[in-house]
Image: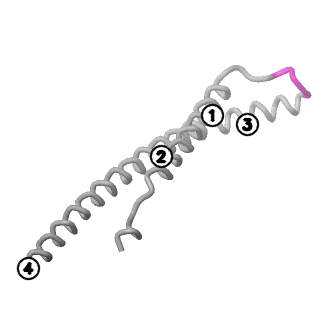
Amino acid sequence: MADRLKVDGSELDKFFKDLTRARNSFVALQKVLHDPGVNGLGTGDLDDACDRFQEDWHHGAKEIAEQIGELTEITRKAKDDFHEVDVALERALEKARRKGGSQ
């Protein structure tokens, strides 16, 4: 039963790295969207589309980056809590085995 409750810390660590990479990408996107536009690279329609995209996604990229950061922290806390419970359960089971063996 204990094997089924086991949390794979290395997989969670990989997940944290992936989340951090995603957050960094959105932070970079936010910076790019905040910087001056790319007007003059194409037709007027393309310039207008780039401007609209920057206006629409500047705030969205910031929000997504913040939410990814919050998700990372919540997940990291859950990993720590699972580990704490796992250690406590292991100690309790060991204590119960010792008591059971001494009867």
Using the numbered discs, state the Cα–Cα distance from disc 1 to disc 3 in whole angstroms: 8 Å
Q: Residues within 10 Å of mark 3 (few under 14, many from 20)?
A: few
**Foreground: disc 1 or disc 4:** 4
Amino acid type indicated by mark 4: Gln
Q: Earlier in the sequence, mark 1 or mark 3?
A: 3
Q: Residues within 10 Å of mark 1 (few under 14, many from 20)?
A: some
Using the numbered discs, state the Cα–Cα distance from disc 1 to disc 4 in whole angstroms: 68 Å
What range is drawn magenta here? 39-43
Residue placed most toward the observer, 40 or 102:
102
Q: Quadrant of the C terminus?
A: bottom left
Q: Residue at x 39, y 68 (%)?
A: 3
User: Hey, which residue is sitting farthest front in the picture?
Assistant: 102
Using the numbered discs, state the Cα–Cα distance from disc 4 to disc 2 in whole angstroms: 43 Å
Q: Residues within 10 Å of mark 4 (few under 14, many from 20)?
A: few
- The numbered mark at residue 53 is 3
Q: Classify 41 as above or below 79.
A: above
Residue 61: x and y, percent? 60, 38
- SS assignment at label 3: helix
Image quarter of residue 22: top right
Residue bearing the label numbered 1: 58
Residue bearing the label numbered 2: 13
Asked whether, in this view, residue 23 is left or right of residue 48, the answer is: left
Amino acid type indicated by mark 1: His
Q: Classify 32 as above or below 49.
A: above
Q: In the rendered structure, does residue 42 fall within the stretch colored magenta?
A: yes
Using the numbered discs, state the Cα–Cα distance from disc 2 to disc 3 in whole angstroms: 34 Å
Residue 71: x and y, percent? 46, 48
Q: Earlier in the sequence, mark 1 or mark 4?
A: 1
